[in-house]
Image (cartoon, rainbow, N blue to C red):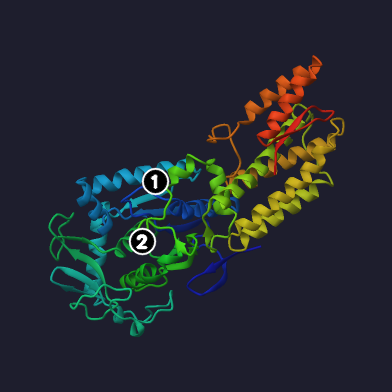
């Protein structure tokens, strides 16, 4: 089945295929690095990591570009407050952000680009817009002329004639229209500045994304991502300046916007002071449980942030991983031949089909995860009554493990590996060691010690199930 994607531009789901038959070109708006990144900044990174992984599962190659707005009013203000040079300050927070993404299992983008390193590209684009009448210069500042782009508002539904200064736009009497926006800002004392044909200055906010996206991906991008709060004015302005520059629409074919991380009725943001940093959460929760938390909600829906939701996600993630760990233990050393084509494995094929159908329907990771739990229930039923002499059962469990590694592991990045660190969690190896000590106590008929170990593990939420094949354990739901 073809992939269906909800396009913010058309407000409907559309069949997706890249312009290039092999490569999907993607641009995602990154962070403004003036402080430690909060979990809301990790949300789009995790979402796009899963989308790219699925596209690759479907046989595409992906090229992902993400920017860093390292020259910005907020960066400058923090620089002036701390005395740390702006670019040094932003570089520090970029490194911290990338370290956090690595911990979350987010694969690096193909290109990370900073506005400070692309000033020449910005200047060239601004000059083109001036030359073709789409922009004008006033006292060293350059503004985009919104009335010169008749399609302004096609992404957000905002119309220039309905927009007033002082609502979503800075008041500036020099602008010809209230909606006109800055492409280049003239230098102010103490701010980073670069030479330009209009005097020293720095880029406006919106122009950087257009200049860098087209530098690395060309004039036509397959997918552009970002938070729902960027639809207007940022992405609306991106479309206007990009298509006015190239005169060759569309700049972006599919606009995808993720829902925002909410605390009550407010979005999590640094400006509101209601944020929790990524590192603070990594200190409290397993990294892949945080991925599970993000992906268990459809990307276009708002994501509720609370301790209860996080704990619920941890429990779900553990059930998924504990199931696979139990399957591995149950068939360890018992698989004597390659998995055959078995009737029971029709269920596995159906599970994969459900997973793929969910992801093909606008990357519905929540529904895809639901199909994985259906697989867990099916394989858990086999393992609970596993007869080691019944080769078909062992083969089915082995096939279930392989499928879970492919879908939950490779595509969604949710399975635990030996390299994963799980702060505050009891490791599988430690539990296995405790069970071995309990078995030795049972063999000595030291029932008091064996029962004591079982009871103490139960108090920690670890349930032991004794079977003819040996003890198995699982975390309490």
Asked if residue 246 lies left or right of residue 457, the reply is left
Quadrant showing the N terminus: bottom right
Q: Position of residue 396 (x, y in %)?
A: 79, 40
Q: Secondary structure at mark 1?
A: helix
Query: Which quarter of the figure has residue 381?
Result: top right
Q: Residue at x 80, y 20 (%)?
A: 447
For disc 1, the marked residue is 97
247 vs 373: above or below? below
31 vs 429: above or below? below
Quadrant showing the C terminus: top right
Q: Residue at x 53, y 42 (%)?
A: 285
Q: Tell me, yes or no, if residue 209 can be seen here.
A: yes
Q: Mark 2 or mark 1, which is nearer the start of the sequence?
A: 1
Residue 245 or 99: which is nearer the viewer? 99
Q: Position of residue 320 (x, y in %)?
A: 67, 44
151 vs 338: above or below? below
Q: Marks 1 and 2, how far apart in space?
A: 24 Å
For disc 2, the marked residue is 214
Q: Residue at x 83, y 44 (%)?
A: 342
Q: Position of residue 189 (x, y in %)?
A: 12, 57
Nearer to us of marks 1 and 2 is 1
Q: Residue at x 26, y 51 (%)?
A: 117
Residue 310 or 47: which is nearer the viewer? 310
Label 2 crowd (10 A; few <14 / some 14-19 / many >=20):
some
Query: Which quarter of the figure has residue 154?
Result: bottom left
| Residue 50, label in figure | none
Asked if residue 236 lies left or right of residue 343, the reply is left
């Amino acid at each position: 089945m073809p992939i269906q994607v909800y396009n913010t531009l058309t407000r409907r789901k559309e069949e997706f295929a890249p312009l290039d038959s092999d490569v999907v070109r993607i641009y995602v708006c990154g962070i403004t690095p003036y402080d430690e990144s909060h979990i809301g900044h990790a949300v789009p990174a995790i979402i796009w990591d899963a989308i790219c992984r699925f596209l690759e599962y479907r046989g595409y190659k992906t090229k992902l570009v993400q920017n860093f707005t390292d020259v910005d009013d907020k960066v400058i203000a923090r620089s002036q407050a701390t005395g740390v040079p702006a670019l040094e300050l932003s570089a520090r927070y970029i490194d911290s952000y990338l370290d956090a993404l690595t911990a979350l299992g987010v694969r690096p983008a193909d290109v990370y680009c900073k506005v400070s390193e692309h000033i020449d590209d910005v200047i060239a684009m601004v000059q083109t817009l001036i030359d073709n009448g789409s922009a004008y210069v006033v006292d060293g500042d350059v503004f985009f002329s919104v009335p010169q782009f008749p399609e302004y508002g096609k992404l957000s539904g905002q119309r220039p004639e309905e927009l007033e200064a002082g609502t979503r736009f800075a008041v500036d009497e020099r602008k010809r229209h209230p909606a006109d926006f800055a492409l280049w800002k003239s230098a102010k004392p103490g701010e980073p500045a670069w030479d330009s044909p209009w005097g020293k200055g720095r880029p406006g906010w919106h122009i950087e994304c257009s200049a860098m996206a087209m530098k690395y991906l060309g004039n036509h991008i397959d997918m552009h991502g970002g938070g729902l709060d960027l639809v207007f004015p940022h992405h609306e302005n991106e479309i206007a300046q990009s298509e006015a520059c190239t005169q060759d629409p569309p700049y972006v074919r599919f606009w995808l916007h993720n829902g925002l991380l909410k605390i009550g009725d407010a979005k999590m943001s640094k400006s509101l002071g209601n944020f929790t940093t990524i590192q603070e959460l990594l200190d409290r929760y397993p990294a892949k449980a945080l991925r599970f938390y993000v992906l268990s909600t459809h990307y276009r829906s708002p994501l509720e942030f609370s301790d209860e939701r996080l704990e619920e996600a941890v429990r779900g993630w553990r059930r998924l991983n504990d199931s696979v760990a139990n399957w591995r233990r149950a068939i360890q050393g018992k698989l004597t031949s390659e998995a055959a084509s078995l009737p029971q494995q029709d269920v596995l094929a159906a599970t994969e089909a459900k997973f793929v159908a969910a992801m093909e329907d606008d990357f519905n990771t929540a529904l895809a995860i639901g199909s994985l739990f259906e697989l867990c229930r099916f394989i858990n039923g086999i393992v609970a009554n596993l007869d080691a002499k019944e080769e078909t059962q062992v083969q089915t469990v082995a096939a279930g493990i392989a499928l879970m590694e492919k879908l939950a592991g490779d595509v969604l990045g949710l399975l635990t590996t030996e390299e994963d660190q799980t702060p505050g969690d009891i490791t599988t190896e430690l539990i296995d060691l405790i069970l071995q000590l309990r078995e030795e106590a049972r063999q000595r008929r030291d029932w008091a010690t064996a029962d004591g170990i079982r009871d103490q593990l139960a108090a920690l939420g670890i349930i032991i199930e004794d079977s003819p094949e040996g003890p198995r354990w699982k975390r309490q739901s």
